[in-house]
Amino acid sequence: MEKTPTQLRLRISSDPANLAPVRHDIESFAQACGFDEAARGEIGLCVNEAMANITRHAYDGAEDKPIEISVSFGDHTLRVEIRDWGSGDLPPMREKPKDPLQPGGVGMVCLMQLMDNISFEPQGDGMKLVMVRKLPQKPAA
């Protein structure tokens, strides 16, 4: 029987070229934890959107700034922490974008709808985003 991983740590730069490899690593970790394909895609999308927002907003487009990602799994719960050292400003929270055909505002909607919980923890010198997704329990036979 294969052992479920408990932790993944990544230290990358804010370069958009890192989005795809990080998403792949996160989705592979989620697969090893038992998440189905749809859930893995949703988790990967949320990480992708969060990282893109860090580059765009926290780092004002700079592609050489640090981002640390810590993923843990325990008690049927996946926890993703994404830390930046950017502006420390919180992104705008909207229930839905003003106009879905216009860019911007969709990333936060994805996070709020696809994860079980999200929170922003100001760090004094940046921000930490914490996203949580529970593994669905299979009914007892």
Image (cartoon, rainbow, N blue to C red):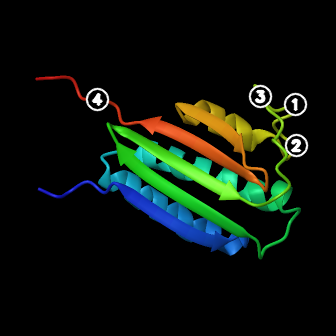
In this rendering, does residue 36 appear at all? no
In this rendering, does residue 60 appear at all? yes
Between 100 and 57, the one lying in front of the other is 57
x and y, in percent, of residue 44 in the image: 53, 53
In this rendering, position of residue 128 left or right of residue 114: right
Look at the image and tell me in which quarter the N terminus lies.
bottom left
x and y, in percent, of residue 135 in the image: 36, 36
State how far apart marks 2 and 4 are (Cα): 38 Å
Between marks 4 and 1 in the image, the one whose residue lies nearer the viewer: 4
In this rendering, position of residue 91 left or right of residue 43: right
What amino acid is found at the position of numbered circle 2 in the picture? Gln
The residue under label 3 is 96
The residue under label 2 is 102
State how far apart marks 4 and 1 are (Cα): 36 Å
Give the secondary structure at mark 3: loop
Do residues under tags 2 and 4 come within 8 Å of each other at their CB atoms? no
The residue under label 4 is 137
First in residue order: circle 2 vs circle 4: 2
Give the secondary structure at mark 2: loop
What amino acid is found at the position of numbered circle 1 in the picture? Lys
* Residue 36, quarter of picture: top left
What amino acid is found at the position of numbered circle 4 in the picture? Gln
Tell me if residue 31 comes above or below residue 63 in the rendering. above
